[in-house]
Amino acid sequence: MGDRTELSMIGRRVSGRTFPATRAGGRRRAGRAGVLLGALVLLLAAGSVEAFQAPAIIEKIDLEKNTIQVRTGQRTRTAALAEDVQVLGADGKPLPGGLRAKELKEGAQVTITGEMAGGGPVIRVIRLGGQAGRVPTGGKDSVGLKPLTDMTAEDRYKGEDGGLYGGGSNQPPAAHLAAAKRQTARIVPVDADGKPEEDGKIGLVSISMSNATQEYSVFKRLADADERKSPHVAIVDCAQGGQAMAQWVDPKGRPWAEADRRLAAAKVSPNQVQVIWVKLANMGPTGELADHGRKLQKDTLAVLTNAKAHFPNVRIAYLASRIYGGYCPTGHRLNPEPYAYEGAFVVRWLIRDQIKGDPALAYDDQAGQAKVPLLLWGPYLWADGMTPRKGDGLIWERKDLSPGDGIHPSESGRRKVAQMLLKFFTEDPLAAGWFVKAKSEDSPR
């Protein structure tokens, strides 16, 4: 039976698509096992499929190439492994040893969950046992928390009041806004040495982990095709899978070397980078906000300090916290709630400390040595699942998150963030000044 026929017999949802079962084959247990094994063959080959889950037999795991070879029916396929791939036991809990676990030997039956990315399959979850068809449904449509933008000065969450900038305000204080305007006015096209040049570039770079690179890469695609974007703005995605804030702390670490490689490939020099977008997160946070939040704050401060040293002309850092993490299955080690929600307070702590004049967050090189860029909120991405956010009605549906872990955005989730970024950079009064092309830059028609 051909792969396409086999897939047509599977009565389950895969990446938002429902495949009806046949009258007979779909009802027979023996036939269904073969059907499910055959499903992965087509899913791995079909670039149009967003996400997949199916059972397979391990043939080989290549740690050097970061790939997995699996047998499905009579065929063998090779897929890439996500840098933060989850390896779970049959009980759904993390398997000791990860990819090196003795249980992942040749011939082991597993369930693989992944998605199509960059033209090929990427495996995000490996779970012992044949559990295909059981897409994780852990988590909730709402966790009952109020978005920071909806909180007032009187609201409290673990002692914190509301508003992106505190005191119930979603706008920066007047003095900080004035400082931001001064810094923004200095964002102009520059040459490779950082000197103003009419035909120069304004580098806009992302720094963060897997979620960020998935979202930012879609933003880049949308923005580069948008007629409003200035031709001087060069968008480069330097965010990387598995590289959260703690991994960027070492100024000579792997993420910075990879960032240099990507900039060079895009023909953008470090001196041309003037704006960065940083999405705050660390992997596997534990404890209360006072514990994991302060670690994230410390790590992010180091990252921002590194960024200023690495990109001497960076003027503005737009900060972001995570999207909704309430659909994450119980026991997931990355960022379930309330950690995804609480990251927003860390963003605010950093900005507030800069406003208060913390010398470690000095940003004005005309008033002394700048240690970091000026900090502002970019678009605030969190909403309480299916509860509409005030003002814009933002919600996060299950389909917006990966069926494999409920943490990484699916294609619809990535596009949602990308559209928020594009709206921000084209409509924010400060950002639009350098991001949107001037009338003089319009091509003659």
Image (spheres, rainbow, N blue to C red):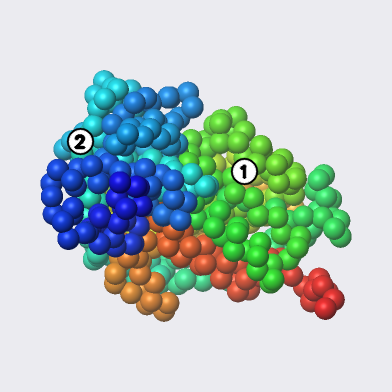
Q: Is residue 3 left or right of residue 191?
A: left
Residue positioned most to the front: 1
**Residue shown at 17% from the left, 60% from the top:** 23
**Front position in the image: 297 or 401:** 401
Residue where numbered disc 1 is placed? 307
**Front position in the image: 262 or 389:** 262
Q: Is residue 213 left or right of residue 228?
A: left
Please state which amino acid type lies under the numbered disc 1.
Answer: Ala
Q: Residue 367 at x, y = what percent?
A: 72, 52
Q: Residue 295 at x, y = what percent?
A: 40, 41
**Residue shown at 59% from the left, 45% from the top:** 238
Q: CA distance from mark 2 to mark 1?
A: 44 Å
Q: Residue 380 at x, y = what percent?
A: 45, 64
Can I make out residue 291 in this image?
A: no
Q: Residue 423 at x, y = what percent?
A: 56, 71
Can I make out residue 394 in this image?
A: yes
Name above or below for residue 268 compared with residue 76.
below
Q: Is residue 353 left or right of residue 289?
A: right
Please state which amino acid type lies under the numbered disc 2.
Answer: Gly
Q: How many marks?
A: 2
**Residue shown at 44% from the left, 58% from the top:** 411
Mark 2 or 1 closer to N-term?
Answer: 2
Res. 129 mark: 2
Q: Residues within 10 Å of mark 2 (few under 14, many from 20)?
A: some
**Residue shown at 62% from the left, 40% from the top:** 259
**Mark 2 or mark 1: which is in front?**
2
**Front position in the image: 98 or 341:** 98
Q: Are marks 2 and 1 in contact (CB under 8 Å)?
A: no
Tell me the element at label 1. Answer: helix
Name above or below for residue 345 compared with residue 247.
below
Identify the image quadrant of residue 444: bottom right
